[in-house]
Image (spheres, rainbow, N blue to C red):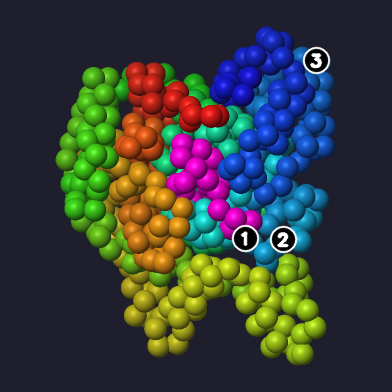
Amino acid sequence: MHQLTLAEIARGLADKKFSSEELTKVLLARITQLDPQLNSFISLTEELALEQAKAADARRAKGESGALLGAPIAHKDLFCTQGIRTSCGSKMLDNFKAPYDATVVSKLAAAGTVTLGKTNMDEFAMGSANESSWYGAVKNPWNLEHVPGGSSGGSAAAVAARLLPAATATDTGGSIRQPAAFTNLTGLKPTYGRVSRWGMIAYASSLDQGGPLARTAEDCAILLQGMAGFDPNDSTSIDEPVPDYTAGLNGSLQGLRIGVPKEYFGAGLDPRIADLIQNSIKELQKLGAVIKEISLPNMQHAIPAYYVIAPAEASSNLSRFDGVRFGHRCADPKNLEDLYKRSRGEGFGAEVQRRIMVGAYALSAGYYDAYYLKAQKIRRLVKNDFMAAFNEVDVILGPTTPNPAWKLGAKNSDPVAAYLEDVYTITANLAGLPGLSMPAGFVDGLPVGVQLLAPYFQEGRLLNVAHQYQLNTDWHTRTPTGF
């Protein structure tokens, strides 16, 4: 049963081949047995899962149906879940039990999903490797000596290892797409505002976006259907109708215009990944797509702009963690200043402290115009590049990452080297565009992803292209040895 996709689970439950409770027990046992190798979960919620599974079975017995009714999933541990630890992978929130459910959690619960637990992540979603978690690094099931990508590495590793069929994740600069590429999954970052951020603990508010991680585009469509929609609680949520994503999966790609930016194939890209991307292009051409070279001239400025804007927003968002109202509090503070300093110094890890310091500096008097304001201007130029490109093409294609997953610890002494791995993903966050990564092959036994970008609210187009590609390739069906 653990090899079933979300779509296959929905059919199996509808045909009464098994119950949600039976499936949940199988997966919980599998997590208990295999996750010690991966460290992909922070919290398991067995009691809640079995209770939700029984409720889903009862709803089906009464004649209810739905693709997510009785489907087991997990949530990245920055989605607030009522009465359950929501840690953000940090010592700062190790003792925090959320008093309410995030909108994504409540929407999926209403659809009948079964929550197996909360997945490990880079601390406060800051990282590209899932090595900054206070609960320890997550391992890549394709090679336990390598990283699974970050910051949603726990969700990615758990799904890739067949511990569950799908999971929620978030993407601030590539944190859904990069782990998807590193673990042979399909991951979708929706348009900014498509999925509510209410109850999603913030890293960088203008960049963060929740989305699905699963094995297939079809499964991503099913999970996104349950997550998307307007939320009056979220001031950045956009009131735009949500289409039926699964209904659009089988559209023809005949005449689809795919843009390939020449800037994607520079010196930083592993030539073996470049070859796999070319193979993906040929597959899509066979399906009727038309390929066109395009240019994104301001892409070279995206990383420095991102690493000013994101830390600036993080320094502001994380100021609330001060040891006063909730979260970690130091022992026996001498005075208020000592309380702030020691609570934050003890509660935050090195990567989070680094980004807070960078962000506070960029926002400080005398530097705001030189750094933050300039970065926002570059952000607009990046968006303009995409708007011009989408006048000529329907989707943009390229590599998700410049390299395959690196070894655990390989980039710990050089944070900038890890930041550069986000070169292809961060532009979508700066512009607020939807982006998808799908499996495209292997280099040295490690998975590689191809990325697709589309205009605003065209998630259905991305899912359609990915689904048609997956009907004609088998990369997404490969399973890591031992899982």
Q: Nearer the viewer, mark 3 or mark 1?
A: 1
> What number is the disc on residue 94?
2
Instruction: Name the residue rendered at 58%, 43% in the picture.
Output: 38
Give the CA distance from mark 1 to mark 2. 9 Å
Name the residue nearer the viewer: 355 or 433.
355
Given contact means CB atoms under 8 Å apart, are the residues at marks 1 and 2 in contact?
yes
Q: Secondary structure at mark 1?
A: loop
Q: Name the mark nearer the viewer: 3 or 2.
A: 2
The three-letter amino acid code for the residue at tag 1 is Trp
Q: Position of residue 321 (x, y in %)?
A: 67, 71
Q: Nearer the viewer, residue 78 or 347?
A: 347
Q: How many marks can you see? A: 3
**Residue 256, image x and y in percent?**
27, 28
Quadrant of residue 111 within the rendered picture: top right
The three-letter amino acid code for the residue at tag 2 is Asp
Question: Closer to us: mark 1 or mark 2?
Answer: 1
Compute the Cα span from label 3 to label 1.
43 Å
Dot label at residue 134: 1
Highlighted range, magenta? 133-157
Mark 1 crowd level (few <14, some 14–19, many ≥20, 10 Å Cα): many
Circle 3 SS class: helix
* Label 2 packing within 10 angstroms: few (<14), some (14-19), many (20+): some
> Which sits earlier in the primary sequence, circle 3 or circle 2?
3
Find disc 3 in the rendering and name its residue.
Answer: 61
Q: Quadrant of the C terminus?
A: top right
Q: Residues within 10 Å of mark 3 (few under 14, many from 20)?
A: few
The residue under the point 32% across, 37% down is: 443
Instruction: Left or right? Give the position of 72 relative to 358.
Output: right
Rendered residue at 81%/16% (across/down): 62
- The kind of secondary structure element at disc 2 is loop
